[in-house]
């Protein structure tokens, strides 16, 4: 069943790329997904969802303007979802220039391609709550002033404003979705929720590992990635291009996330110590199962994020299906069932 819509998804190998592909295929789209050539196979998420063979995979890199122009001109998509990014905040402190080149200039390259090749292509930009950084208002909404705290956040702020600027200057249907943290079993292994769910599940299954963790007091507004890709589609399929916050409106700390995993795993535990000395003891055998390691602290931390999703709920009728508890349970159960899969 085809609907004559052709989507180009940059970053199709990532968490959101996989779920968005699945959603668009279910809606009858012809889906083109971009991937960078690498030395090893990287389609494990698409394979896990059983959709790899339904997607047209295109060689693509946001660093290379001639490649971007060629791809956009050849495919002539009706919608582009720009999900590709160097998306890991700690890496952005180590590789700030590369991160900016991909996330900021890469977005600008794509907008220029749309402007010069076909202005009718609708454009979605994957903006982020990380742009709010040292927050100026609680909860954060579409009008809240940005104060990014990482090279990643700075690069995404540039891309966010470039998207708005191309909409206002050239009448391109360009939307920026300011998405708060969203997780799933397909989340990359280095992000905190996946790391916690995976390591604690391995401990439950008998491993001697200890979960080494950074700032357990940081708070995030965590939602489910499957709900959030639906918000992306709603934005591009509304009659007016605009920017929207996508969040749950509830936040929890990293410590809360650990506690919820331990509860689901039925591990009897106790927190001891404070700050860098904080640790968790398994009361069943007195073993330390979680300890704080300052190597995971960041040069500048985003202490607490919480978004106000009123606008997208009112205008686009977006409604998430997952709660925090359901999300954590799904991530933990996935790890218990598939301890050897690493995304
Ligand atoms: P992800 O899993 O890290 O995926 C990022 C994707 O970008 C991967 O497919 C990666 O390809 C690709 N990529 C990296 N550098 C590239 C380059 N130079 N050229 C082309 N592709 C490149 O990220 P995600 O969690 O799915 O997030 C999707 C987008 O939403 C990202 O832009 C992220 O910054 C943004 N975002 C995410 C969240 C969240 O909580 N997940 C919240 C707000 C915004 P490789 O496989 O080759 O590395
Ligand atoms: O899971 P995180 O690495 O996600 P972070 O930094 O919030 O970024 C994610 O969400 C953004 C949306 O706000 C996206 F734009 C971005 O692409 C990415 O998807 O860390 C969450 C929190 C941080 O405060 C961090 O300091 O968890 C804290 N944390 C504590 N221990 C840790 C760890 N983070 C990681 N990755 N690893 C730890 O061991």
Image (cartoon, helix red, strand yellow):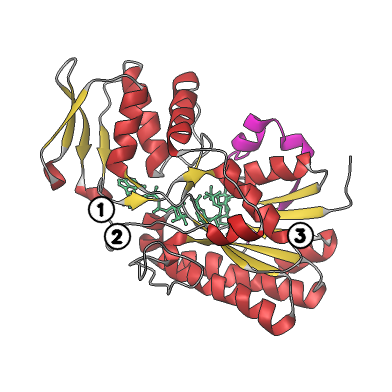
Q: Secondary structure at mark 3?
A: strand
**Residue under the point 81% across and 73% down:** 117
Picture coordinates of residue 274, whole percent (x, y): 12, 43
In the displayed structure, 40 sits above or below 153; it is: above
Secondary element under disc 1, as helix, strand or loop, is loop
Q: Is residue 125 visible?
A: yes
Please name the residue that numbered disc 1 is placed on.
297
Residue at 72% over, 35% down: 51
Q: Is residue 110 left or right of residue 269?
A: right
Q: Is mark 1 within 8 Å of ligand 2?
A: yes
Whether the residues at callouts 1 and 2 have beta carbons within 8 Å, the answer is: yes
Q: Nearer the viewer, mark 1 or mark 2?
A: 2
Question: In the figure, residue 266 lies in which quadrant?
Answer: top left
- State whether label 3 is within 8 Å of ligand 1: no
Count the marks: 3
Residue 11, image x and y in percent? Answer: 62, 52
Q: Which residue is mark 3?
A: 79
Residue 54 colored in magenta in the image: yes
Q: Which residues are magenta?
A: 37-61
* Residue at x 15%, y 40% (from the top left corner): 278
């Amino acid at each position: 069943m085809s609907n004559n819509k052709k989507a180009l998804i940059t970053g199709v190998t990532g968490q959101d790329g996989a779920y968005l592909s699945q959603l668009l295929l279910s809606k009858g789209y012809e889906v083109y997904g971009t991937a960078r050539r690498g030395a090893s196979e990287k389609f494990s998420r698409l394979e896990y969802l059983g959709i790899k063979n339904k997607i047209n995979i295109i060689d693509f890199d946001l660093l290379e303007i001639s490649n971007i122009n060629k791809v956009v001109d050849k495919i002539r998509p009706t919608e582009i979802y720009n999900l590709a990014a160097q998306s890991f905040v700690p890496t952005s402190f180590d590789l700030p220039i590369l991160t900016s080149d991909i996330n900021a200039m890469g977005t600008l390259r794509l907008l220029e391609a749309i402007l010069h090749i076909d202005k009718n292509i609708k454009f979605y930009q994957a903006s982020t709550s990380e742009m709010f950084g040292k927050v100026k208002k609680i909860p954060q909404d579409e009008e809240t002033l940005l104060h990014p705290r990482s090279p990643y956040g700075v690069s995404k702020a540039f891309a966010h404003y470039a998207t708005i600027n191309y909409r206002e200057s050239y009448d391109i249907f360009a939307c920026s979705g300011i998405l708060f943290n969203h997780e799933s079993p397909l989340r990359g292994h280095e992000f905190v929720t996946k790391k916690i769910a995976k390591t604690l599940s391995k401990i439950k299954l008998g491993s001697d590992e200890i979960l080494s963790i950074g700032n357990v007091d940081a708070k995030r507004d965590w939602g489910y990635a499957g709900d959030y890709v639906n918000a992306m589609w709603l934005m591009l399929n509304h009659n007016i291009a605009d920017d929207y916050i996508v969040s749950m409106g509830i936040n929890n700390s990293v410590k809360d996330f650990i506690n919820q995993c331990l509860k689901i795993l039925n591990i009897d535990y106790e927190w001891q110590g404070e700050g860098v000395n904080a640790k968790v003891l398994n009361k069943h055998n007195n073993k330390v199962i979680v300890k704080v390691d300052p190597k995971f602290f960041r040069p500048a931390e985003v202490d607490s994020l919480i978004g106000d999703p009123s606008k997208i709920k009112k205008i686009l009728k977006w409604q998430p299906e997952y709660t925090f508890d359901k999300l954590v349970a799904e991530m933990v159960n996935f790890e218990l069932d598939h301890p050897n899969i690493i995304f």
